[in-house]
Amino acid sequence: MSEPLGFAWLAVLALFLWKRNALFGVLLALLSLWLLSDWNMLKYNLDDDLYLGQLGGCVGSLLVTNIVLLTAILLGVLVVYWRWLRRA
């Protein structure tokens, strides 16, 4: 979360929790999906610091991060669906 994409995710999450807007729900879901796929695809790269750190025992697993990002994806999609149901 210390890279620019992680900071952008935190900003979108803060805006989503503050405004509860469907647009921010979509942005939160898409950005979370992007982060989830990016981190999990780079996890097993042999030149990646995360992989090498996990081999040495210095870095924990990404299970908590994956759960948080999946929850954010579901929350964003549910808010958009809820807004759509209220208008129908």
Image: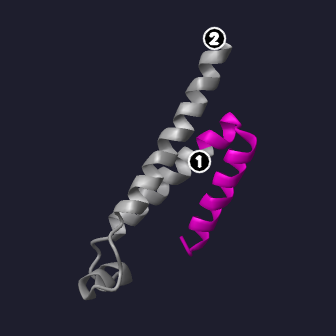
Q: Mark 1 and 2 residues: CB-CB less than 8 Å, in contact?
A: no
Question: Type of residue at label 1?
Answer: Leu
- Does residue 37 appear anywhere in the picture? no
Which secondary structure type mostly characterizes the magenta part of the structure? helix
Q: Residues within 10 Å of mark 1 (few under 14, many from 20)?
A: many
For the C terminus, the image quarter is: top right
- Asked if residue 49 is positioned above or below residue 74 in the image, the reply reads below
Q: Position of residue 27 (x, y in %)?
A: 61, 46
**Residue drawn at 28 percent across, 85 percent down:** 57
Report the Cα–Cα distance between label 1 and label 2.
23 Å
**Residue drawn at 35 percent across, 70 percent down:** 42
- Residue 44 located left or right of residue 4: left
**Residue drawn at 68 percent across, 38 percent down:** 23
Query: SS for tag 2?
Result: loop
**Residue drawn at 26 percent across, 88 percent down:** 56
Q: Nearer the viewer, residue 75 or 5?
A: 75
Which residue in the protein does label 1 denote?
28
Give the residue furthest to the top: 88
- Does residue 82 appear anywhere in the picture? yes
**Which residue range is magenta in the image?**
1-26
The earlier-in-sequence mark between 1 and 2 is 1
